[in-house]
Image (cartoon, helix red, strand yellow):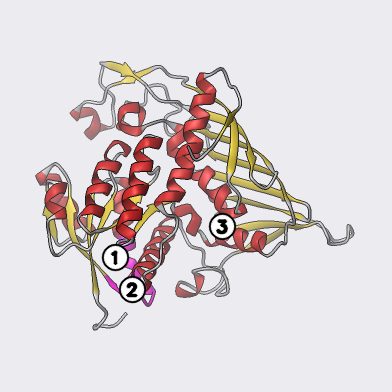
Amino acid sequence: MTSSTPALNVAMIGYAFMGAAHSQAWRTAPRFFDLPLTPVQQVLCGRSPDALVQAAEKLGWAHTETDWHAVLTRDDVDLVDICTPGDTHAEIAIAALEAGKHVLCEKPLANTVAQAEAMVAAAEKAAAGGVRAMVGFTYRRVPAVQLARQLITEGRLGQIRQVRAQYLQDWIADPEAPLSWRLDKERAGSGALGDLGAHIVDLVQFITGEAITGVVGLLETFVKERPVATEFAGLSGRAGTERGPVTVDDAAIFLARLSGGAIGTFEATRFAWGRKNAIRIEINGSKGSLAFDFEDMNVLQFFDAEEGARTAGYRRILVTEPEHPFVAAWWPAGHGLGYEHAFTHQVVDLVNAIAGGTQPVPSFADGLSVQRVLAAVEQSSRAGSQWHDITKN
């Protein structure tokens, strides 16, 4: 980055957990990577004026707006970063693209397939005029995940035969944990399936280069109602006495077939006590295996089945060398990266794509492919766990 590098003026809508992670990424990326455009944290948008001003000061945003519609009319905004609940994604993203703004939208892309299809149509129309759109599946940009994809692309695993994918958390395992928007189907679309399952669906399709073509699924809600959080509860961490219904799944399990002939098992739950953010992917091929666990995110396990039995075994690859994806911009070998770095890598890839006039990935079409899998799992579960093929229609 140089002082003469053109600016990329960013507006971010929403400033909670994801907003904080995205803010750090916009702030950090140009300081560690040489970018063709300089991200500028121009506008932060939210509904509560007082909280918004505090968030903008804390997270490094120059201006604020309380109406996202106003953001789209500003000449000093080139890109809109959407960090809001899923029920708002389609409306904001489509309007932003029609206003000529590049869009980064958090996952899952939308709450329904129909919404996602409308977003893809808007993105394709905007792309004809040089306006770009990307969905934020940040775990793709963990260096160990990138290395896994490289090894499979190079043929090191041979033909992919089996996949095991889990995303395990415990943040609502306590039945007295209060309701939040993530437990409301109208706002979140689904529960563990969309919040966590979307990530492992995308990771498997990204790493293997294959599409999920059919599923048989089972969804379960273990705790049917929870305390309704009050203003006091939000400040004290205690729940109120009123209770409300949980309208999403607590856990999702499904079997899948992939386009290359492999079979897979997928599990997403927010009820796995002791698991904080365990994303576990294991892929078995005709020539070897790979295994990854995000709770040890700088490591990739690799088994070469063509090595002689005398020395064969899983090889622990510490993915912190300058030759590994993204790592050269950071610390010396052995000095691991963390959760936040994947968001920075996302900004790097997005900025490079915008400057180069190319389609950033994952695209809205990639997000739609994930949405179709989620919908098929939900439909399968509703139908008594019957097999459900996934098509483009």
Q: Which mark is residue 145?
A: 3
The image position of residue 320, as x and y in percent, is: 56, 68
Q: Give the SS element for disc 2.
A: helix
Q: Give the SS element for disc 3.
A: helix
The image position of residue 17, as x and y in percent, is: 31, 46
Mark 3 or 1, closer to the camera: 3
The image position of residue 165, as x and y in percent, is: 60, 41
Q: Quadrant of the N terminus?
A: bottom left
Earlier-in-chain disc, 3 versus 2: 2
- The magenta segment is 24-38
| Residue 27 part of the magenta-drawn span | yes
**Label 3 CA crowd tier, 10 Å (few <14, some 14–19, many 20+):** many
**Label 2 CA crowd tier, 10 Å (few <14, some 14–19, many 20+):** few
x 68%, y 65%: residue: 154
Please determine whether, in this image, residue 214 is positioned above or below residue 57.
above
**Label 1 CA crowd tier, 10 Å (few <14, some 14–19, many 20+):** some
2 and 1 marks in contact (CB < 8 Å): yes
Please determine whether, in this image, residue 97 is positioned above or below residue 248.
below
Q: Which residue is mark 1?
A: 27
Earlier-in-chain disc, 3 versus 1: 1
Q: Which residue is mark 2?
A: 31
Residue type at tag 1:
Arg
Q: Compute the Cα span from label 3 to label 2.
A: 24 Å
Looking at the rendered structure, the number of numbered marks drawn on it comes to 3
Image quadrant assignment for residue 103: bottom left
Residue type at tag 3:
Val
